Amino acid sequence: MSTPEHVLVAPASEGGEFVFAHVPLGAGIRVWTRGLVRSVDESPRKLRGVAAPLYGGSIRDMAALRDFLTDYLDSTTDTSTVPLRRARIRDTRPLVARTSLDHVSSRMHFSYRAFSPMRTIGAWTGAAPEMLISRVRGLEQSSVGYFVTGLPGLPADVTVDALPTDQPGAVIGRGSVEGLAEFLEAPAGHVLHHLGRDFKG
């Protein structure tokens, strides 16, 4: 069965996948993980309380993700009335600090867009969802890096042609979709110029 146009299944090179889907009425793009296997060993941990596991790796096909975001922007309007709210990070450091990408040494090599915390739709009781998409500065690559924590998992028995439209979940809001699409469309050399202007996504 083919994948519906409003859904993208994006495999991770390290195993598992992301499922992206349009929020009804154009409010943004929902994100689930499914079977991610590469957890990041944070050292030193420096975590307080109970923290959601951190996963990292790369999404294999940057072009497919970029085209999905562009298609979403081209096919929806910015008039949604779907209520979105920003989740609250509790008992741990924000994602950018957990990945050390806020250090100058990392910023010399990577440019990124961070959603920390992400917006949510519906009742949210889990850890605050966070997502970071990164590119190696100055290099042409077919993949794009990621770090995620607190994102909802999509059960293995849920098929992409029957995704629940009313299930609470993490959302990349429309404004953030526009910024991420621009980030992924930038030629590799131009990504260098995102230092400073797009430092925190």
Image (cartoon, rainbow, N blue to C red):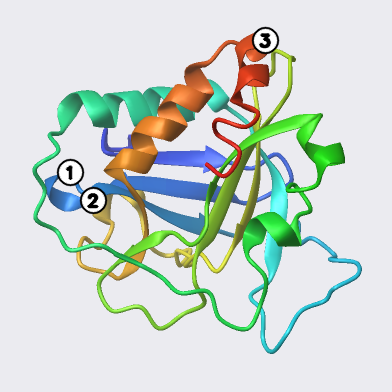
Q: Look at mark 3 in the image and give the residue it sits on.
A: 189
**Label 3 secondary element:** helix
Please determine whether, in this image, residue 194 is positioned above or below residue 174.
above
Q: Look at mark 1 in the image and give the residue it sits on.
A: 26
Please determine whether, in this image, residue 190 is positioned above or below residue 143.
above
Badge 1 local density, few (<14 within 10 Å), some, or many (20+)? some
Mark 2: amino acid? Val
Q: CA distance from mark 1 to mark 2?
A: 6 Å
Compared across the picture, whether 49 is left or right of 190 comes to: right
Residue 78: % across, % down:
14, 38
Compared across the picture, whether 98 is left or right of 70 comes to: right
Residue 60: % across, % down:
63, 31
Please determine whether, in this image, residue 87 is positioned above or below residue 133.
below
Q: CA distance from mark 3 to mark 1?
A: 32 Å
Asked if the residue at tag 2 contacts the one at tag 1, i.e. Cβ–Cβ closer than 8 Å, the answer is yes
Q: Nearer the viewer, residue 153 or 148?
A: 148
One can see residue 37 in this view: no
- Residue 23 badge: 2
